[in-house]
Amino acid sequence: MRMLVLGGTWFLGKEVVRGALKRGWDVTTFNRGRSAPDTPGTEPIHGDRTSANDVRRLARSGPWDAVIDTSSSDLPPRDVLLATQALRNQTARWVHISTVSVYAGWPHDPLTEDSPLLECPPDADETYGYTGADGSPTEYGFQKAGGERAVSDVFDGRAVFLRPGVILGPGEYVGRLPWWLSRAHQGGQILAPAPAERRIQPVDVRDVAHFALDQAADSTTGAYNVSHPEGITFEDFVGTCLEVTGGAGRPVWAPASHLTEHNVRQWTELPLWRTHGGVWAVDSTKAIAAGLRCRPVRETISDTWSWLCADGRPVAHPRWAKHGIDPEKEEKILASRADRSE
């Protein structure tokens, strides 16, 4: 099996490459060569996928049996289209890492693969789309929907779309789970979003990578929601963070009304917290039937802490700084909770 990975040096792309090499596949990676070292055993080709000349140069190194695109998250559809058109005759199959944000109903409605998608043309630039007043839909979702269109228009009948929600695990660059682990390790009273029994569906990066490789080697097409079928309650999530870090902390559960009263930003100041009804109602039945296997979230939490303790250094990314509540703000909210309980 000869495979091309667009990206391939950090987080999901790196896990895809590792998994492919373990399977004995011949792996080419294409990236700018700036974020992280190339994985030994690959054939790295450095270039900018937004450059037509670089992408044409890449195409001359083909053909490949499959392409897995892990690097389009920050690209407009027109740049995805550039790659698909250049590689149209150089690969039999395209596995595209997308997102649940492409759904028009996310995060309000429960989702299946048949749920309506946002509309975006395949040649749109980075200005297309908008973010709604309540944070949905998102400009990011429009852009990713256009990216899917760019793939499907060129690779009709030869493409697979994987739509994960939140991906966690060793190597995470966004900072969601690392923030909770760091906060748990710090200890003390920890502001946590009620209800404690709310279930969340983060999926492990290694499980997404394994499923992507299976799809690259398969002959099926279409879309798959990639979410944890069982998930974990927020209470168990925070409790596991405390357990693996040895933190002497205690969560203080605050209802959404109280957090909103104090202008706590959903999704970022308390990572993974969002009140919309459909955010953690993503049906992965189809992917499970196709072979997706998800390890317990507790294992993901534990392995991420081990990675951090072993001097795990994520690729520098601006999204990291957006996650986590300011300690003074947290202390103020905790104090207000104590006042109300007196």
Image: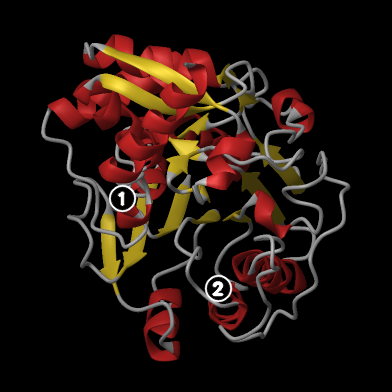
For this orientation, the residue located farthest to the bottom is 53
**Alpha carbon of mark 1 to alpha carbon of mark 2: how far?**
23 Å
Q: Which mark is residue 257?
A: none
Which residue does the numbered mark 2 point to in the structure image?
87
Give the amino acid type for the residue marked by disc 1 in the picture: Trp
Residue depth check, mark 1 versus mark 2: number of the one nearer the observer: 1
Give the amino acid type for the residue marked by disc 2 in the picture: Leu
Q: Position of residue 186 (x, y in %)?
A: 20, 25
Q: Position of residue 70 (x, y in %)?
A: 47, 56
Which residue does the numbered mark 1 point to in the structure image?
10
Describe residue 159's horizontal placement relative to residue 312 as left or right: right
Q: Position of residue 333 (x, y in %)?
A: 41, 36
285 up-or-down from 162: above or below = above
- Which residue does the image show at 57% across and 18% down from the upper left? 196
Mark 2 or mark 1, which is nearer the start of the sequence? 1
158 up-or-down from 17: above or below = below
Near-viewer residue (322 or 161)? 322
Describe residue 266's horizontal placement relative to residue 154 as left or right: left
Could you say whether the residue bearing mark 1 is in a helix, strand or loop?
A: loop
Could you say whether the residue bearing mark 2 is in a helix, strand or loop?
A: helix
Describe residue 87's horizontal placement relative to residue 148 as left or right: left
Q: Position of residue 327 (x, y in %)?
A: 27, 41
